[in-house]
Image (cartoon, rainbow, N blue to C red):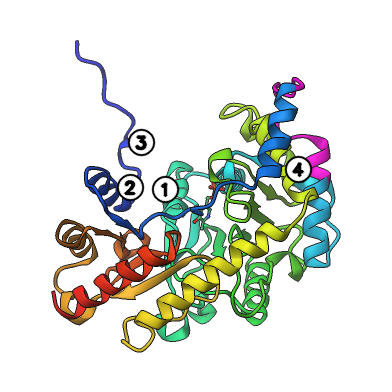
Amino acid sequence: MKPRPAASRALTMPRSAIREIMALAAGRENVIHMEIGEPDFSTPDHIITGALEAAQRGFTKYTPNPGMASLREAIAAHVSARTGTKIGAQRVVITTGAVGGLFCALMSVTDAGDEVLIPDPGWPNYESITHLAGAKPVQFELLSDAGFVPDFDTIEAMVTERTKAIMMNTPSNPTGAVLPAGIMERLADFAKRHGIYVISDEIYEDIIFEGEHVSAARFGLDDRLFLVSGASKTYAMTGWRLGYVICPEDLAPVAAALIEPVASCASSISQKAYEIALAGPQDCVAEFREIYRRRRDILLDILGNTGLLPVVPAGAFYALVDITDRHAAQGSLAFAKRLLQEKNVAVVPGITFGPSCDRYVRVAFTTGDDALLEGLTVLRDFIHRP
Ligand code: PLP
């Protein structure tokens, strides 16, 4: 007898179109990479050295499910100071990357058939995690004319009896939008009125060029907020897989328990590294930010007056570029493939980020200035003279 079928939940999980581009790019030489969503810097030396020393001293065992007590304290103090709130360490759960925090949050509050409001454009993992939880992703569109800021009148109309949570992301991947205080306040008001949870993904909180990062934690959402962030983008620590989620107090043990069957705990050495990162000098954070800002300005120099930039990115290290000028019928995946095959430039097809986004490709400024300048110039010319 043949083996019975594999799990339909796994087989039907939405996959991001970026994989196709990455696979194609991997098989080529001298590609200009504008598709990669991670810092191109190494983790600062003092963090690596401190973690290495800890490992040499034998700090290589499991930690409790929600993480080391001292790191939970440090994160609670860090977030409290930033947001002007009082967050207790018992609300902090340390996870395998921010993505682990998103997973714990969604698995803590959704049952099969529940609905989760997610942004379109938005990071594709929101949809896949919701799917794995057995819940239904309901996408709300962020309009470029509004600067990719959510419109709560539209979102109101999407709420049903089954709506459990809304996901928000500021600064945003892929739009680069930074949500202002007024919008975060409306988000809080919306969640309070409807009795739903807010899952606020703030992983790019330290990469801001204009305005300020406004955390959802500032708006009295303690009983319904899952605030997700971590080490990856701020300290160029993507490979260490270290994030956290700050939970409503009663749900922190629930979220922590969810880690047991999946990972037991986040890597102990990475936890130590993040503790060192938070306690140590912060110049590296400012240095990285200034490099991204300089690259963002290169983007503005090349695309600013072309009408191809729907909004100027104010944070994170991404921008959407409008390809409709010449490529409306083609779609963003076909466009990205052609750009790679014909010009050796890799970008992410917008369709990865939601159905509204097929008229765009996403570029990441996580590549050196010269390559970025060349890649953006090639992209601009390719849109105008395919
Ligand atoms: N959230 C967003 C919006 C991201 O873009 C990413 C990574 O690209 C993550 C979360 C995941 O971060 P981590 O690497 O810490 O899991």
Task: Tell me, yes or no, whether the highlighted magenta stretch contains residue 299.
Answer: no
Look at mark 1 in the image and give the residue it sits on: 128
Picture disc at residue 15: 2
Q: What residue is shown at x 37% (from left), y 61% (from top)?
A: 353
As measured in the structure, the alpha-carbon distance from the residue carrying label 3 to the one carrying label 1 is 10 Å
Q: Is residue 19 left or right of residue 243?
A: left
**3 or 2: tag closer to the N-terminus:** 3
| Helix, strand or loop under label 3 | helix
> Magenta span covers which residues?
57-73
Within the image, what quadrant is residue 219 found in?
bottom right
- The single residue placed furthest to the front in the displayed view is 370
Looking at the picture, does residue 96 appear above or below residue 373? above
* Three-letter code, disc 4: Glu
Q: CA distance from mark 3 to mark 4?
A: 35 Å
Front one among 102 and 369: 369
**Disc 4 marks which residue?**
275
Which quadrant: the C terminus?
Answer: bottom left
First in sequence: mark 3 vs mark 1:
3
- Contact flag, marks 1 and 2 (Cβ < 8 Å): yes
From the image, tell me which residue sits under label 3: 10
Instruction: Answer with mark 4 or mark 1, whichever residue precedes in sequence.
Output: 1
> Could you tell me if residue 314 is visible in this image?
yes
- Compared to 275, does 332 lie above or below? below
Disc 1 to disc 2, C-alpha distance: 7 Å
Q: Nearer the viewer, mark 4 or mark 1?
A: 4
Distance between the alpha carbons at the discs numbered 2 and 4: 33 Å
Mark 1 crowdedness (10 Å alpha carbons): few <14, some 14-19, many ≥20: many
Disc 4, SS? helix
Residue 225 spot, x, y in % from top left: 69, 58
User: Which residue type does callout 3 highlight?
Assistant: Ala
The type of residue carrying mark 2 is: Arg
Q: Earlier in the sequence, mark 2 or mark 4?
A: 2
